[in-house]
Image (tube, rainbow, N blue to C red):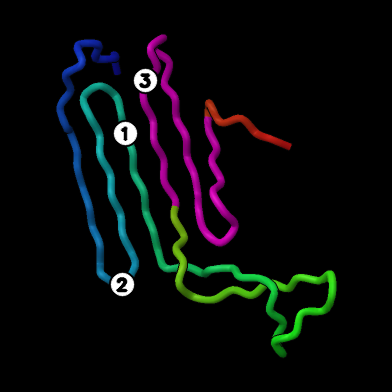
Amino acid sequence: MARNDTGNSSILKNEFVDDGAGNFRWAFETSNGIKAEQTGVPGLVRSGNAAADGKVPKNETTESEEEGGAEISGSYSYIAPDGQMISVTYTAGVDGFRPKGFIVAIQV
């Protein structure tokens, strides 16, 4: 797809679905090459510092998971000024935000 440098673009796709129970999906696309979408489902929340008996041993952290979070996956892409397609996919949830893609720097 050629980049639209006029600054004017139109919406080709715009969708949003929410079932009211924590499940959702949205997506959009524009005529200048921008696309994004995301899907979410109910998930877990991770919390720490609480053992099953309520006591936390010195210098020790325990983690537990409970309902209330969300598990999300999505992607976005666009055409850079040099004409190159930039694409990123990601997940987010109990393990944090995890992007993967062309311009994502990985820190070790």
Q: State which region is magenta.
A: 73-101
Expressed as whole percent of the image width and height from the top left, the position of residue 11 reads: 17, 32
Expressed as whole percent of the image width and height from the top left, the position of residue 75 reads: 41, 40
Name the N-terminal-most of marks 2 and 1. Answer: 2
Q: Is residue 6 magenta?
A: no
Q: Quick one: quadrant of the C terminus?
A: top right
**In the depicted structure, whether residue 78 falls above or below residue 89:** above
Residue located at (47% from left, 34% from top): 88
The furthest residue to the right: 58
Amino acid type, label 1: Lys
Q: Quick one: quadrant of the N terminus?
A: top left
From the viewer's perspective, tell me whether residue 106 is left or right of residue 45. Answer: right
Residue located at (82% from left, 79% from top): 57
SS class, disc 1: strand
* Residue under pointer 1: 35
SS class, disc 3: strand
* Residue under pointer 3: 79
